[in-house]
Amino acid sequence: MEQDKIHVLYIGSERINLALMRSLFRKKLPDLTLLEVEDTASGIQMARVHKPVLIMIDIEFPVEHQYDILPVLQSCPDTCGIPVWAISACAFNDEIAKGIQAGFNRYITKPIDLEQFIQRIRMDIAI
């Protein structure tokens, strides 16, 4: 791992979403290195090793097991300060509130407004 790299961790298993994130980071956020894993257990391990500046979890249904990552990350000294975003196709107000209450720093709904998404990333990690 290169120490000067700024890492963002993306947790999600849908190939189309992974392709979108890869393209977005390559074209619009080239100063960031996108790390990808398909499940939350691997995400916890990756976060502990690489200490990304942001973790994004693509929420899929059922969502319960994806919320389990939050207390683990929040209780670990190496990861407790890392912002964690939910990305979801579910835009119901009660689901958004549930996500924020669970501890996500942001709850991004699909379809993603890419320009706003990029601005939020830059703002939240101060680049």
Image: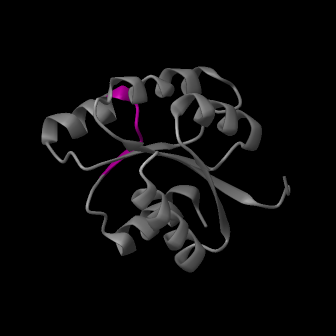
Q: What residue is rendered at 67% in x and 55% in y?
A: 7
Could you tell whether 71 is left or right of 98 in the image? right
Vertical placement of residue 13 versus 121, above or below: above
Is there any visible trace of residue 4 in the rendered image? yes
Horizontal and vertical percent for residue 54? Answer: 57, 49
Check residue 71 for magenta coloring: no
Q: Which residue range is magenta in the image?
A: 102-108
- Could you tell me residue 96's position as x and y percent? 23, 40
Number of numbered discs visible in the structure rendering: 0
Above or below residue 86? Residue 118 is below
Q: Position of residue 11 (x, y in %)?
A: 51, 44
Looking at the rendering, which quadrant does residue 51 occupy? top right
Q: What's the colour scheme?
A: one colour
- The answer to which of 21 and 81 lies nearer the viewer is 21
* Residue at position x 29%, y 29% in the image: 62
Identity of the residue drawn at 44% across and 69% down: 119
- The C terminus is located in which quarter? bottom right
